[in-house]
Image (cartoon, rainbow, N blue to C red):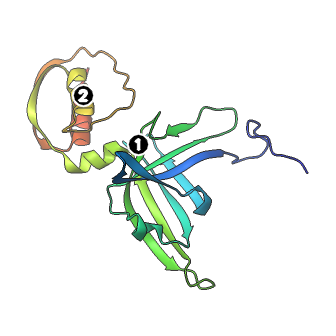
Amino acid sequence: MAVAEKNILDRAGKYNLSELNIISYQQVDNEPRFIDIKGITLTLSITEDIFSNNIMGSIIVYDTQDIRTLLPITGLERLSFKFNTPGLPGYDMSEKTGVPFQIYKVDSVRKDEQNDVGQFYKIYFCSPEMYYNQMATVSRAYSGPIENAVVDIVRQKKYLNSKKPLFVESSATNAKYVIPSLKPYSTINFLSKQTI
């Protein structure tokens, strides 16, 4: 029997999923509670778009233990995973070495007609910055180079609280802007249009 090589891309759409966990907001012995859902996952879909500020995705699972009520999934959970296309680095959104996604919705719950305890449902997740963007507003004045304002919005805990690498280019714009209660993404988009 032939063994598939994980590091060789031998067919279209091949990927390696090495980790897939839901991280609960509840803690056990001062450590977050993890539930491995790799074994019950049917599909994993990730959307990355140059016209969107976020990475979003969904997972369809077949659950026979009712994890969504045992954990429970309330909207404060995160999704940790590692996957890659063979030969490429891929995504590391794990708890220890990356930035986990935020779970924001469980939908499309459907009972399995052949099994009384089985159910299908869809777990939606997004970049943590999208989650923070929905909760925060920017109401302040920024003066000086616009890139300093963008770094402030991206890094500050009360705005986007991003831990991801950020690459910033210098601009020639040195002005003062008053932001009148806009969402962080709207503020960044506004400032980017003013930049020279």
Q: Position of residue 176 (x, y in %)?
A: 10, 23
The residue depicted at 67 percent of the width and 45 percent of the height is: 15
The residue depicted at 60 percent of the width and 32 percent of the height is: 89
The reply to whether residue 193 is visible in this rendering is no
**Please, is residue 74 above or below residue 165 in the view?**
below
The residue depicted at 42 percent of the width and 54 percent of the height is: 125
Residue type of the residue flagged with mark 2? Val
Q: CA distance from mark 2 to mark 1?
A: 18 Å
Secondary structure under the numbered disc 2 in the rendered image: helix
**Which residue extends farthest right?**
1
Q: Position of residue 84 (x, y in %)?
A: 62, 40
Depth check, mark 2 against mark 1: the one in front is: 2
Marks counted in the figure total 2
Q: Do the CB atoms of the residues marked 2 and 1 lie less than 8 Å apart? A: no
State left or right for residue 81 relative to residue 145.
Answer: right
Say which residue label 2 marks: 150
Which of the two labelled residues, at mark 2 and mark 1, occupies the earlier sequence position? Answer: 1
Q: Nearer the viewer, residue 175 or 38?
A: 38
Secondary structure under the numbered disc 1 in the rendered image: loop
**Please, is residue 171 above or below residue 183 in the view?**
above
State left or right for residue 196 relative to residue 104.
Answer: left
**Please, is residue 139 above or below residue 120 in the view?**
above
Give the number of the disc on residue 127.
Answer: none
Residue type of the residue flagged with mark 1? Phe
Q: Nearer the viewer, residue 96 or 103?
A: 96
Say which residue label 1 marks: 51
State left or right for residue 97 relative to residue 193.
Answer: right
Q: Position of residue 186 (x, y in %)?
A: 23, 42
Q: Nearer the viewer, residue 171 or 135?
A: 135
Mark 2 nearby-residue class (10 Å; few <14, some 14–19, many ≥20)? some
State left or right for residue 127 relative to residue 36.
Answer: left
